[in-house]
Image (tube, helix red, strand yellow):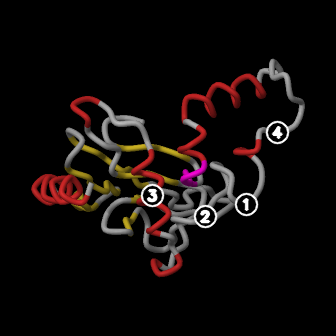
Amino acid sequence: VVGSSVFVHGGLHPKHADYGIERMNSEASEWIRGESKESAVPWFLSGRNAIVWSRMYSMPQEEKCDCGMLFEALGKLPRKRGNEETRRMVVGHTIQYPMGINAVCDGSVFRVDVGASKGCADAEPEVLEIIEDREVRRLRAHVAPQILVGATEAVKKYKRSLVKG
């Protein structure tokens, strides 16, 4: 988690948030280094709903994204400085071609896998830029930066989330 954004390769589900990000990071590191008491792959790294393989928030068709699950997962993450909640997730794993970097679920999940590898879509590289934890922009070569979420919009959305919670 950086600021109010959580970064995960595939997707973080509510059961992952309940288990704990720090715990998953620690157990995955131990397993990778061969220091785990268990020889089996940790449950959160295996299967279609693993944090590295999930596509629950990254299907190209927005209606196939489980926004309810996303909001539940974000709501379960520990609050940070000033009791601020994690309000956005950044995921990869599922190529967003030809759209490129995009957001769904009211700007709460950003899908950043553009398929730049020659073995995939051979698409132009793109960068997601988050400025002061408010403004979110997409950067592409030879194109002006595109604001995906403006600072004013982000503040309004955050205030709405406080009223809901």
Q: Secondary structure at mark 4?
A: loop
Q: Position of residue 52 (x, y in %)?
A: 65, 49
Q: Earlier in the sequence, mark 1 or mark 2?
A: 1
Callout 3, which amino acid? Glu
Q: Earlier in the sequence, mark 3 or mark 4?
A: 4
Q: Main secondary structure of the magenta part?
A: loop
Q: Please name whichever residue, 4 or 79, is drawn nearer the observer in this view of the structure.
A: 79
| Residue ranking furthest to the top | 35
User: Where residue 21 sits: x, y (%)?
Assistant: 54, 35
Label 1 with label 4: CB-CB less than 8 Å: no
User: What is the C-alpha distance between the residues marked 2 and 3?
Assistant: 16 Å
Nearer the viewer's eye, disc 2 or disc 3? 3
Front disc: 1 or 3: 3
Residue 142, percent from left and from top: 29, 59
- The residue where tag 1 is placed is 48
**Which residue has dot 3 on it?**
72
Magenta segment, which residues?
11-15
Residue in view at x 73 percent, y 60 percent: 48
Report the Cα–Cα distance between label 2 and label 4. 20 Å
Q: Earlier in the sequence, mark 2 or mark 4?
A: 4
Amino acid marked by disc 2: Arg
